[in-house]
Image: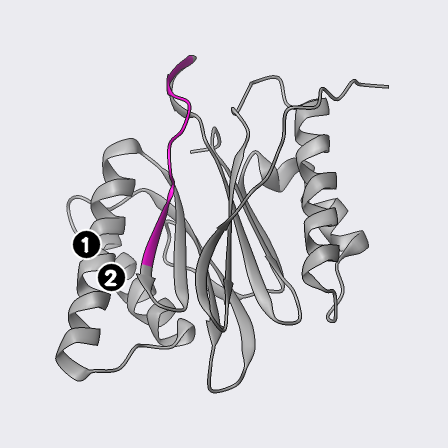
């Protein structure tokens, strides 16, 4: 579960969700453009990591149920409501004979509160609202950078600068090639993919 890189950063008017592009099994890279995110509704995005079969199956199950709710009720769940549903499904799974081994970052924008939201959820069904988060190898190398540079009123541009610092640190210190990152942004207008060039080599001091 540590081979993937997941990052989440909240800004004043959006949430940035980042996932590594490499799909790995053991020491082998199977795919270099893997999308580890799923759009749940207009203003909520989920990024996942963990066991390969569990992640996709659980993500698509959650995606289908959230979209079914939106169609039946003609309204979307807020990011907090989605996180509660996801946590309850993981808790049920944890007490079954075949629990999902999935770690998640749930990012969104609440149009009523007009504020970004980010939730850290792990395979033991723990859920916490956080200003920034990481899963996988990113938590070892990036949380100290986020602790130092993130604050409550950063702009999107500042958030992207912090992300650049995180990816540079990963390239500098991580012994595996995670094939760059996919960056998506959730704001009041919905979800969009943000171009992110990550080809510049970074050398260890």
Which one is nearer the viewer's eye here, 71 or 65? 71
The span from disc 2 to disc 1 (Cα, nearest Å) is 10 Å
Q: On the image, which quarter does residue 9 sit in? A: bottom right
Q: Image check: 59 left or right of 155?
A: left
Q: Residues within 10 Å of mark 1 (few under 14, many from 20)?
A: few
| Secondary structure of the residue carrying numbered label 1 | helix
Q: Image check: 6 left or right of 38?
A: right
Q: Position of residue 59 (x, y in %)?
A: 27, 50
Q: Residue at x 74, y 71 (%)?
A: 153
Which one is nearer the viewer's eye here, 196 or 69? 196
Q: Residue at x 52, y 25 (%)?
A: 178
With respect to residue 76, does 155 lie above or below? above
- Residue range in magenta is 28-39
First along the sequence among labels 2 and 1: 1
The reply to whether discs 2 and 1 touch (Cβ–Cβ < 8 Å) is yes
Which one is nearer the viewer's eye here, 147 or 123? 147
Q: Which residue is mark 1?
A: 61
Q: Residue at x 58, y 66 (%)?
A: 14
Q: Position of residue 11 (x, y in %)?
A: 65, 65
Q: Which label belongs to residue 89?
A: 2
Q: Is residue 188 magenta?
A: no
Q: Is residue 34 magenta?
A: yes
């Amino acid at each position: 579960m540590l081979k993937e890189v997941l990052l989440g950063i909240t800004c004043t008017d959006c949430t940035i969700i980042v996932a590594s592009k490499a799909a790995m099994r053991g020491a082998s890279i199977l795919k270099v453009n893997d999308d580890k995110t799923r759009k749940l509704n207009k203003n909520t995005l989920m990024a996942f990591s963990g066991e390969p079969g569990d992640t996709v199956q659980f993500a698509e199950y959650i995606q289908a149920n959230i979209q079914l709710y939106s169609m039946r009720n003609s309204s979307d769940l807020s990011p907090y409501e989605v996180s509660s549903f996801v946590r309850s499904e993981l808790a049920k799974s944890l007490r079954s004979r075949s629990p999902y081994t999935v770690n998640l970052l749930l990012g969104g924008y609440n149009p009523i509160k007009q504020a970004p939201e980010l939730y850290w959820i792990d395979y033991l069904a723990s859920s916490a609202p956080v200003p920034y988060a990481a899963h996988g190898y990113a938590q070892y190398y990036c949380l100290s950078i986020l602790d130092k540079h993130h604050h409550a009123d950063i702009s999107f541009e500042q958030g992207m600068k912090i992300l650049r610092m995180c990816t540079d640190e990963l390239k500098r210190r991580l012994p595996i090639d995670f094939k760059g990152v996919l960056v998506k942004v959730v704001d009041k207008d919905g979800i969009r993919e943000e171009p992110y060039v990550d080809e510049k080599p970074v050398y260890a001091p």
